[in-house]
Amino acid sequence: MEQSDVNLNWLNSSLSTIRQEASIVGFEIEDVGIGSGFAGTVLRAALTYDISTEAPATVILKLPVKDEYTMEALKAQAVLLREVKFYEQLVNRVPVKVPRIYHLECNDDDYAIIMQDMGDIKRAEWLEMSVAEARPALIALAKWHAEFWNDPVLQEAWLSPVTDANESSRQRNFEQLQRALSILKQSKQPTEHSVTAAEKLLELFPKTPDRVPLPKPTTLTHGDYHINNLHIDNNDVLVFDFQLVAEGMPSLDVANLLFTSLGKDDYEQHEESLLQLYHQTLIDSGVRKYSFRKFKRGYADAKFTTFLKFLVVLGTIDFNFEGGEEYQTNTIEKVELNAQWSDAIGYSRKLPFIFFVMRLINVTRNLLGTARTH
């Protein structure tokens, strides 16, 4: 569905359950996704009714991304429809607040979501959260993870890890890493750690296994858990943007939040205590046989995975928008910090052995007939 398809008939039909006796007689569309969302079109619709009503004055519309290259990448990674399916099938199980959904529709690769307008959309900038905000965000995340801990629903085909690749997505990732390396080399900022690690990754890329086996335990991961996708009011946390939900290691969301949203000093001073808070909340929420030591081992892998994700983002985004140059500068700074925090150079040197182990696991699982439900 495209913005041009949004009309009075569609809005009145789609919002029939919430507009009560009123009818929508006019609307204005604002594209609020420019510089904030790269995997979809995000619009705000200001609605005019024919009578006084308590129905919402504005709503948020989420439609497929316009850019064909990005659309093909989303299809190749099987993430295009994940948010719709999340709201259809899993949202009622999530023990955190989410925006109210007014309408969902999905047809093949086309979809539309109408949801509650939460206020200002956070533009493309690296917002930082305080440690005081990080604590409730991690508590909410741990409760979410505990709900889906090793849950059978994770075997649904649409929740397969985004890291599982076909030939098309592998080629795109290779091109994205090449572009990221080029951007890093051309930058006047310090990029020594990230450039060295990226060069090693490109060298090893042809040897990367097609499927990354997930160590247990796994849970339902948000996939993009950071301050831009959270509303935090004191200790009250609301989460949105579920485009990348998948089965994954719980530590992936933790690393993504801390790497993305904490300032350098806060991360380096408070990382350990924040990890302990998240782990203790898991235990308090009923998770068993998951020691802090085991969590930290997974967290080390998650830190490198998050660095790799940052590289792909750097090589994917078209920074040709208002504020794009500053956003690119800040992204490069984050990539370099992540390379240091994750010891990306040292980790990349271990990858040949890690790849060997992954292939052994994949072969064993194939022999045992392990497969996802379809």
Image (spheres, rainbow, N blue to C red):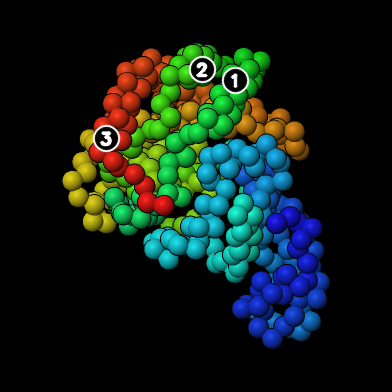
Q: Which residue is mark 2?
A: 202
Give the label, 2 or 3, closer to the camera.
Answer: 3
Callout 1 amino acid: Gln
Near mark 2 (Cα within 10 A), the count class, few <14, some 14-19 or many ≥20, is some
Residue drawn at (49%, 25%) of the image: 337
Q: Extreme left residue here?
A: 289
Q: Amino acid at mark 3?
A: Leu
- What residue sits right under mark 1 in the picture? 178
* Residue sitting nearer the eye, 9 or 325: 9
What is the CA distance from the residue labelled 1 to the residue labelled 2? 7 Å
Q: Are marks 2 and 3 in contact (CB under 8 Å)?
A: no
Q: Residue at x 60, y 24 (%)?
A: 175
Q: Which mark is residue 367?
A: 3
Q: Nearer the viewer, residue 172 or 141?
A: 172
Cβ–Cβ below 8 Å for labels 1 and 2? yes
Q: Secondary structure at mark 3?
A: helix
Residue 285 vs 92, above or below: the answer is: above
Which of pointers 2 and 3 lies earlier in the amino acid sequence? 2
Residue 221: x and y in percent read 41, 47
Residue 169's mark? Answer: none
Q: Earlier in the sequence, mark 3 or mark 1?
A: 1
Q: Position of residue 345 (x, y in %)?
A: 42, 16
Tell me the element at label 1. helix
Which label's residue is closer to the chain start, 1 or 2? Answer: 1
Location of the N terminus by quadrant is bottom right
| Residue 136 spot, x, y in % from top left | 40, 52
Q: Nearer the viewer, residue 166 or 234?
A: 166
Residue at the image point whose x is 63% and y is 17% from the top = 182
Q: Amino acid at mark 2?
A: Leu
Secondary structure at numbered mark 2: helix
